[in-house]
Amino acid sequence: MLTYPDIDPVALALGPLQIHWYGLMYLLGFAAAWGLGRWRAARPGSGWSGVMVDDLIFYGVIGVILGGRLGYMLFYGLDQVAADPLALLRVWEGGMSFHGGLLGVLIATALFARRQGLTFFQATDFLAPLVPLGLLAGRIGNFINGELWGHRTNLPWGVQLPCEQFPRQCLDQPATTLLSPAVHASQLYEALLEGLVLFVVLWLFSSRPRPTMAVSGLFLVGYGAARFSVEFVRLPDAHLGYLAFGWLTMGQLLTLPMILAGALLLALAYRRPTGERA
């Protein structure tokens, strides 16, 4: 079994100023999206300019941060806000909802598309392949923060956690126990599936002309399937537990509409006459 490394969530401290790894992971994700977008815009016939990419990423950053934090507090942390309203502002402590961030990005992208004279799906089809590397970086940030662990496992890549740092994983162990039973590092599973695998699939799929809405639809289906699957080995939030059937989590409930919407977009994209697909 593997042992969780002792990682300080603060990457750099300069007096009262602290720079957290979690925030740096988001910065890395935004930088990767910007670089990939610039590279794709530079290709002949892309219809995009570098300035358009700059604006799109700026809108996306605002959407991710505001939507992700508000979504987390709405879906998972209303009790925290009720007890401490300032918790809404402490983004560096973790607590960002992908589904809230997605809604924020969709609203921001709609505003960007309107300003640029593009259709909504022209903008989302360009943006979708740029997102997964940011998801990968964010999940690594979750791992560094020591959050979103999975169920116990006997698999050789299970991770044992220090009981002093992670008491939830040691509740049924003797008080003198130093390391928890091994658990799934579900954050890294999500980093692999939602991040690396989804990026490769979308990047290759979008490298050739596709019907409008197809890339966006594939993103929704791909992310939804990856997230829904990993939720089976990921512990639900302690204050929510399972919502139904002894296995349905809030993450799965929020992900189902994404899968359905993505499948609908793919169906609409490929059912339109060829002449209307450009």
Image (tube, grey):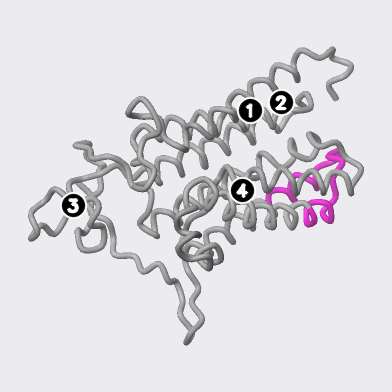
Q: Is residue 86 left or right of residue 57?
A: left
Q: Mark 3 points at which residue?
A: 170
The residue to which callout 4 is attached is 101
Dots 4, 1 in contact, CB < 8 A: no
**Horizontal and vertical percent position of residue 25:** 52, 59
Compare residues 203 and 58 and report the one nearer the observer: 58
The kind of residue on which mark 3 rests is Cys
Say which quadrant the C terminus sits in. top right
Residue under pointer 1: 218
As drawn, 248 above or below 15: above
- Name which of mark 4 and mark 1 comes first in the sequence: 4
The label nearer to you, 2 versus 4, is 4
Which of marks 2 and 3 precedes in the sequence? 3
Viewer-nearest of labels 1 and 3?
Answer: 3
Residue 264 badge: none
- Marks 4/3: CA distance? 32 Å
Q: Are marks 1 and 2 in contact (CB under 8 Å)?
A: yes
Task: Give the x, y percent position of residue 123.
Answer: 79, 40
